[in-house]
Image: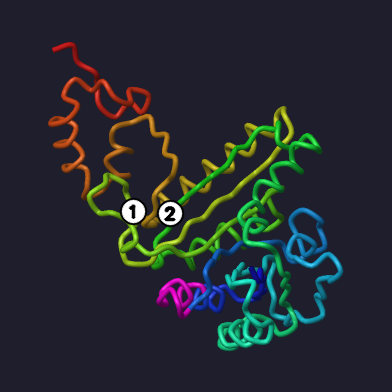
Amino acid sequence: VRWIRVVYAEFEEFTRDAEFLVSQKEDQSFDYVEGFVFCNNDDPVNGWPSVQLNPDQEFNPAHLPQTAGPVLYCLELAFHYRNSDQPSTVDMAVSRLVRGLGFVDGLISQVEVSYMGFLLRVKRAEQDAKANGVWDNPHPWLNLFVSKSDIVDFDRTVFKKMVKNGIGGPMLIYPLLRSKWDSRTSVALPEGEIFYIVALLRFVPKGPSVEKKVAENREIVNWCIKEGLDFKLYLPHYRAKEDWKRHFGNQWTRLEKRKANFDPMAILAPGQRIFKRTNQ
């Protein structure tokens, strides 16, 4: 696997390239496309050092334009190939795919890893977190689906203001295609073909900071509701039926009918408090 990271200073350029890559046919794009936000500083956890794949290569902020803001964006890409492929063939294929992207010149990092090595990259991060004790800390994570139509506003307020100093963990953001999801399921998604997953994966020490970070997550969700963003919270935990109705939107009636048909006594999932259990 050729594992690549490219850096963007402008959110619009980042989203344009990400949406283009995930919308291409399978043989005309990278085999893996994700993205994340990081701080425009030298913080080892939240900033420039968190981006480089090659340990021998340093992030050079001199490449950044003067217009760069408090946060930067990274597209993470992977190109799969066979052991029998010539290196020059792989180089040409990757160059062709990268050529049209609008990332900052000079801010590209890439390494060669085995296919299994690439698949187990998160497992290695988990092992490191367990080794240094971080894994046992509380995880007040926030996961959202945000519509393409609202993602610029989300970036402007949440990434550039609310969490501009980092969260002590990854801040993922990348587009998904609605057509890849089975419409027969009851999953609630934002409108439109393209929407974004946003994941704020915090790791915090035990103590008062946990409640503070939970409150920050709640502040973000409340802002999304107040501004009328088309978003979905996952995994959702609402206390009022009205919140669940808002979550499911125009799929609420279908959900009610399915519950009446397949679980009329509301035996399943009582913890969500959506439907009241009955003894009848």
Q: Which residue sits at x=56%, y=57%?
A: 158
Residue furthest to the top: 279
| Closer-to-camera residue (116/105) | 116
Residue 11 is situated, as x and y percent measured from the top left of the image, at 57, 73
Image quarter of the N terminus:
bottom right
Residue picked out by circle 2: 145
- Left or right: 26 with respect to 202? left
C-beta proximity under 8 Å, tags 2 and 1: yes
Q: Which residue sits at x=51%, y=73%?
A: 18
- Left or right: 15 with respect to 132? left
Magenta part of the chain: 18-28
The three-letter amino acid code for the residue at tag 2 is: Phe
Identify the element where label 2 is drawn. strand
Identify the element where label 1 is drawn. loop
From this view, report whether residue 96 is shown above or below residue 82: below
Residue furthest to the right: 56
Mark 2, Cα crowd under 10 Å, few <14 / some 14-19 / many 20+, is many
From this view, report whether residue 146 is shown above or below residue 69: above
Q: Which residue sits at x=36%, y=57%?
A: 230
Image quarter of the C terminus:
top left
Q: Predominant secondary structure in magenta?
A: helix
Residue picked out by circle 1: 189
The three-letter amino acid code for the residue at tag 1 is: Leu
